[in-house]
């Protein structure tokens, strides 16, 4: 298996972890102040987490390499898309009633998944086996002098 394929496949567990955590966090914030606390293992909590994982893993597949504005637009729409996956008629009413929590959590999730996408695909992989390529890819602020100029008579 090629290393590039492993990097591409490694981002999906990270996206799933972020989606599950943010799905639970958003659900917990929506129920803040009520006697109900969403616990892992309950049907509704697991249902929301699975819908969040499906939504964000598919977004990570289809939106790979897009701009941050595209990710944030998707994040703004993600509560409505998640409501259509989780509970279509009542989900929209619940999301719109708790939109002050749902939409910021969707935007935060979009930003986190965008950062995972940038971290995995933002940098070009180059061959650093030759000294010329290593010098060209160094992070020094002062560039190395030209080789012919280094030995010029003074």
Image (spheres, rainbow, N blue to C red):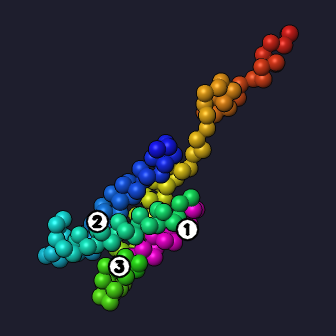
Q: Position of residue 60 (x, y in %)?
A: 47, 62
Residue at mark 2: 25
Q: Position of residue 93 (x, y in %)?
A: 33, 87
Q: Which of the two marks, 2 or 1, is nearer to us in this view? A: 1
Q: CA distance from mark 2 to mark 1?
A: 23 Å
Q: Position of residue 118 (x, y in %)?
A: 52, 53
Residue at mark 1: 70
Q: In the figure, residue 134 lies in which quadrant?
A: top right
Q: Is residue 109 magenta?
A: no
Q: Residue at x 16, y 71 (%)?
A: 42
SS at mark 3?
helix
- Label number found at residue 128: none
Q: Residue at x 65, y 24 (%)?
A: 131
Task: Give the mark nearest the N terminus, 2 or 1.
Answer: 2
Which quadrant is home to the C terminus? top right
Q: Is residue 71 left or right of residue 48?
A: right
**The magenta segment:** 66-79
Q: Which of the two marks, 3 or 2, is nearer to us in this view? A: 3
Q: CA distance from mark 3 to mark 1?
A: 21 Å
Q: Which of the two marks, 3 or 1, is nearer to us in this view? A: 3
SS at mark 2?
helix
Residue at mark 3: 85
Q: Residues within 10 Å of mark 3 (few under 14, many from 20)?
A: some
Q: Residue at x 44, y 59 (%)?
A: 113
Task: Give the mark nearest the N terminus, 3 or 2.
Answer: 2
């Amino acid at each position: 298996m090629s290393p590039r394929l492993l990097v591409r496949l490694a981002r999906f567990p990270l996206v799933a972890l972020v989606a599950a955590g943010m799905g639970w966090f958003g659900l917990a914030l929506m129920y803040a102040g009520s006697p109900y606390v969403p616990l892992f293992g309950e049907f509704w909590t697991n249902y929301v987490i699975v819908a969040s994982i499906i939504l964000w893993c598919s977004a990570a597949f289809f939106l790979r390499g897009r701009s941050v504005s595209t990710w944030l637009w998707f994040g703004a729409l993600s509560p409505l898309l998640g409501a259509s996956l989780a509970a279509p008629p009542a989900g929209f009413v619940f999301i719109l009633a708790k939109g002050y929590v749902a939409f910021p959590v969707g935007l935060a999730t979009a930003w986190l998944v965008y950062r995972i996408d940038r971290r995995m695909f933002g940098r070009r992989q180059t061959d650093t086996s030759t000294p010329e390529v290593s010098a060209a890819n160094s992070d020094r602020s002062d560039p190395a002098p030209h080789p012919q100029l280094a030995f010029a008579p003074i």
